[in-house]
């Protein structure tokens, strides 16, 4: 099989890249060892975060670091056995989170985030998937006035610098829009513009359907079979050998397996996370995703039920599941909103692909012709998938890019 482009990885980022290439007339094949969207893209909180211009920083205050180190935080968990392997990444992550450097990173991150809603809206309209969007925004809720005031001050700074709107909610206003939340909350912060997605996997599959209707092909295969040929790239798939002029690496948390084999030493790691679905109790309804600020979990109304997602677990990607955070936050979540019985037989786990400077890796591979990278989106894989797919396709096709790709180049490391 000879194609113009092969996209490796059928998560939401890979699907969007393949769709944009196929829509530009490039015969494209999408390759994955599993069915589409069965990994990280399956289990997120379902938010397209227009407000998420400031990426998640490594904590730098001593009190927070001590709580994490002593295992007293529900927002963060770690495997002690993994710390030696993760130490170089964590050190670089901590350095990049210095306030001055973090502010600069946010400015470089902003052009992608600012276009996230428009690009998803465009793809969803073409794929007939608009019904999966809930235009509710999302809420951050607070148990203490101190936490509330700190986050409201930060939200005001983000609004001033990046033009993102929010609304501060005193307890009565919070009760009006989400009457079944705990009455003991100290208030909330409502971001009205982000889109909530009722079923993230269904959205990805709708984009995939559009890709296939345009003539794109989905095949099973192992990306690690990638090898250079004479002016092209070779791959092995269940449908036979593939020759492709351009290859896009969109393997998420597995990107390093291929990039290392090709001689790249990119500082990649993962933040693992878990989810569980619940039936609502007592006829309660939740109108929008709600993030508990102090405890680091999110409750998101989904097609399957209310999805409880956890914070970050620092561990090796393939280590056995340890859903400690889920067990810790479930009682807190039940106090926040009336949850019924669990709907999943066991907790789901995914791995968020991260770089230490919190920016994704997008663009041309430094040492290989016609090889392109699109990974490292951390907490914002769903948010940035559509804009990343467009940017990669524009670079491959020689079109003027919608944003300057320089901050996301692999050779910045």
Image (cartoon, rainbow, N blue to C red):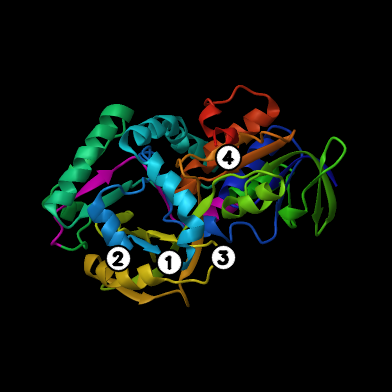
Q: Is residue 361 magenta?
A: no
Q: At numbered mark 1, what does the secondary structure look like: helix, strand or loop?
A: helix
Which numbered disc, 1 or 3, marks the residue that appears first in the sequence? 1
Q: Identify residue for label 3.
A: 318
Q: CA distance from mark 3 to mark 4?
A: 36 Å
Q: At numbered mark 3, what does the secondary structure look like: helix, strand or loop?
A: loop
Residue nearest the viewer, comparing 324 with 92: 92
Question: Is disc 1 in contact with disc 3, using a CB cutoff of under 8 Å?
Answer: no
Residue nearest the viewer, comparing 286 with 388: 388
For label 4, count other residues whose C-alpha is less than 10 Å away and answer few (under 14), some (14-19) or many (20+). few
Residue mark closest to the camera, 1 vs 3: 1
Residue 32 position by quadrant: bottom right
Q: CA distance from mark 2 to mark 4?
A: 49 Å
Residue drawn at the location 73% of the way across and 36% of the way down: 368
Residue mark closest to the camera, 4 vs 1: 1
Q: Identify residue for label 4.
A: 126
Does 290 sit left or right of 199 as displayed?
A: left
Q: Position of residue 87 (x, y in %)?
A: 46, 54
Which numbered disc, 4 or 1, marks the residue that appears first in the sequence? 1
Q: Identify residue for label 2.
A: 70
Q: CA distance from mark 3 to mark 2?
A: 24 Å
Which numbered disc, 3 or 4, marks the residue that appears first in the sequence? 4
Residue segment shown in magenta: 183-205
Q: Position of residue 197 (x, y in %)?
A: 44, 52
For label 3, count other residues whose C-alpha is less than 10 Å away and answer few (under 14), some (14-19) or many (20+). few
Q: Identify residue for label 1.
A: 80
Q: Is residue 267 above or below residue 398?
A: below
Q: At numbered mark 4, what does the secondary structure look like: helix, strand or loop?
A: helix
Residue nearest the viewer, comparing 281 with 394: 394
């Amino acid at each position: 099989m000879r194609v113009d482009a092969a996209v490796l990885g059928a998560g939401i980022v890979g699907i969007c890249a393949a769709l944009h290439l196929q829509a530009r007339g490039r015969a494209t094949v999408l390759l994955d060892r599993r069915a589409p969207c069965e990994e990280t893209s399956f289990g997120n909180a379902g938010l397209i975060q227009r407000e998420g211009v400031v990426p998640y920083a490594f904590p730098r205050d001593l009190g927070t670091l001590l709580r994490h180190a002593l295992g007293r935080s529900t927002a963060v968990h770690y495997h002690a056995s993994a710390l030696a392997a993760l130490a170089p990444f964590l050190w670089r992550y901590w350095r990049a989170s210095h306030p001055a450097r973090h502010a600069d990173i946010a400015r470089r991150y902003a052009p992608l985030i600012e276009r996230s809603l428009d690009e998803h809206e465009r793809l969803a309209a073409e794929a007939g998937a608009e019904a999966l969007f809930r235009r509710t925004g999302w809420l951050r809720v607070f148990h203490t006035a101190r936490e509330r005031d700190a986050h409201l001050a930060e939200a005001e700074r983000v609004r001033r610098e990046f033009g993102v709107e929010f609304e501060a909610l005193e307890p009565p206003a919070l009760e009006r829009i989400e009457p079944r939340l705990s009455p003991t909350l100290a208030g909330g912060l409502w971001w009205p513009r982000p889109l909530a997605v009722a079923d993230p996997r269904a959205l990805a599959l709708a984009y995939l359907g559009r890709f296939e209707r345009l003539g794109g092909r989905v095949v099973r295969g192992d990306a690690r079979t990638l090898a250079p040929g004479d002016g092209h790239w070779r791959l092995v798939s269940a449908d036979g050998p593939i020759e492709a002029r351009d290859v896009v690496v969109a393997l998420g948390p597995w990107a390093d397996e291929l990039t290392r084999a090709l001689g790249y030493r990119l500082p990649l790691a993962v933040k693992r996370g878990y989810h569980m679905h619940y039936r609502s109790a007592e006829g309660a309804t939740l109108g929008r995703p709600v993030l508990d600020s102090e405890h680091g979990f999110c409750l998101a109304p989904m097609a399957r039920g209310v999805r409880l997602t956890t914070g970050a677990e620092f561990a090796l990607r393939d280590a056995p599941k340890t859903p400690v955070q889920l067990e810790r936050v479930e009682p807190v979540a039940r106090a926040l909103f009336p949850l019924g019985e669990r709907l999943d037989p066991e907790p789901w786990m995914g791995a968020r692909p991260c770089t230490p400077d919190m920016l994704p890796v997008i663009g041309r591979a430094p040492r290989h012709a016609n090889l392109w990278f699109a990974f490292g989106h951390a907490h914002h894989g769903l948010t940035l998938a559509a804009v990343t797919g467009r940017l990669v396709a524009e670079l491959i096709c020689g079109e003027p890019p919608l944003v300057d790709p320089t901050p996301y180049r692999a050779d910045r490391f």
